[in-house]
Amino acid sequence: MAKLKNIIKQLSEKDFKAIYDSLIESNAEKSAYLLKGLRERQLSDTKLMTELDVNANAYYTLRSRLNLKIEEYLMGQLESPRTDVLRKVANVTEVLFTKKKAISVATLKKLEKELLDYDLANELTVIYKSLKKLNINSPDYFQYSQLYNRHVAYMLAVDKAEDMLADYFKKYADYLLNGGEVEKLGLSLLMKEMQNVAKLYESHRLYVYHSCMYIFHRLFVEVDDNMQQDGESIEDIFSKVQKIFESYHLDSIYYHLNLVFEFLKLEYYNHYKVYRQAEKYFEEVNDACGNLLVNYSTYTFPSQFLISKIERHIRTGNEADMYAENESIFLDYEVDMLDVPRHLIYVVYKAISAYYVGKFDEAAKLINGLLNDVSLKKYPYAQLEIKSLLALQYTLLKDFELFNQLSNSIQRQIRMFGKDDCENIQLFLKILKIATSEAKKEKVKKINAVLPRLAATTVGYFAPTKLIKLDERLVDLLTEF
């Protein structure tokens, strides 16, 4: 919210009026009132909610939509000069066939300068190709040939970096759900390949793409102790990337990648448990959660935010708040069952948020839907975890028949893996069996004896059962039979 207020206050009078008028014309009076209130009046969120006559959920949605409207307007302002340059490049052939050579060369040289400012390597190849033709009988032909070849190679390097970035995060999803050493090795090899590509050119774009991967890799795959220590610190990288974004403020890709780096800063401070700093970025990333999850999976792993969000609410003791937010933060979310890891984490998040407000039936329905909609054969450990989470819901719903069926299925699967690989699931299941046993004596004592052992277990893959708070509430729920 603080960032939204800051953006609104920094709008020029012309931009503010244009956004305000467009909201009024589109009958979005409440959004227009909110915009004016945040700019001209020092009102708290509670006061604004009262004046707008909306509840907290509706207010959250309202400010998210206002933020989106402001972003759309600002993007329109950013794109206009860039679009003009691209339009001129599209008309280069017309210039070559209708203008005298001196005018054509001057036009192309001017376009070259503008394209360099925008770092548009693809379009620069068109310019250098045209300048080569115009200078075929001139000594400058060799210079433009070299520039053309260099920018073709650079363009291919940027394309390769983008492809590697997307491939890395697709592979990371598999690694997260399986925790295998083979997947980890593949990620490390991709990281090295990206480093090699980034070293080929003094390119801010390659630096930014490399940073997206490098920071994430250091936080979630190979922690600092296992990485080279003679490189840049993560905070230095953040600082340098921010300077690049400010220098190329008209670049639409950088405009959007700013959200990726806010997410990475949040995860960086979470990783080092500097939670006060993490809170500075949480709200902004949370506001853009739906957009982040849907549109940024080729530049980072957005689903990690949902995992971090659950952990944050458990840490702050506000687990019940998640459920109320779901409708607004997932307002524009698009379900994609082809992206199994993302869909799995999304459903798990919704199921766990339902669990924390006592809606066990809804949680069970969500998990059953997941198991029916997608195949988890590729992710056997994740499948075990999901089934165990479902077994918890059946236990709390007192549906002992379904619990016993599912429990037997989980145990068969554990025997296939080997007991040593699934200690946390075995302990989790042991607690549920104590809760559902006919023997009523000392259930609380028996469960409390197992909880510390379960809490001490560690796993190398995404484990939803580790997101269930092992507290007095859980024990009370399990022993209300």
Image: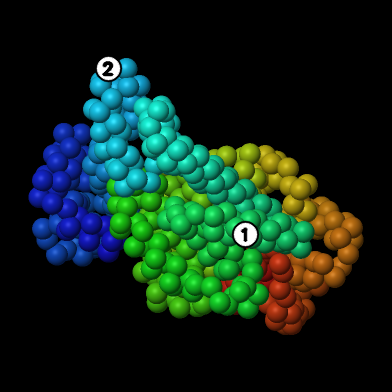
The residue sitting at 28% across, 61% down in the picture is: 3
Whether 161 is drawn above or below 285: the answer is above
From the top left corner, tell me how far across and down residue 462 is, in percent: 66, 61
Among the 4 quarters of the image, the one containing residue 2: bottom left
| Tag of residue 98 | 2
The residue sitting at 47% across, 63% down in the picture is: 264
Among the 4 quarters of the image, the one containing residue 134: top left
Instruction: Give the side of residue 287 with respect to residue 346, left or right.
Output: left
Snapshot colouring? rainbow
Instruction: Give the side of residue 108 with respect to residue 199, left or right.
Output: left
The residue under label 1 is which amino acid type?
Met
Q: Circle 2 — which element?
A: helix
The residue sitting at 79% across, 70% down in the picture is: 423
From the top left corner, tell me how far across and down residue 106 is, in percent: 25, 33
Q: Circle 1 — which element?
A: helix
Q: How far is disc 2 from disc 1 in space, using C-alphas? A: 49 Å
Whether 242 is drawn above or below 69: the answer is below
Quadrant in which the C terminus appears? bottom right
Residue at image mark 1 = 191
The residue sitting at 74% across, 47% down in the picture is: 376
Nearer to us in this view, 122 or 161: 122
**How packed is label 2: few (under 14 Cα within 10 Å), some, or many (20 or more)?**
few
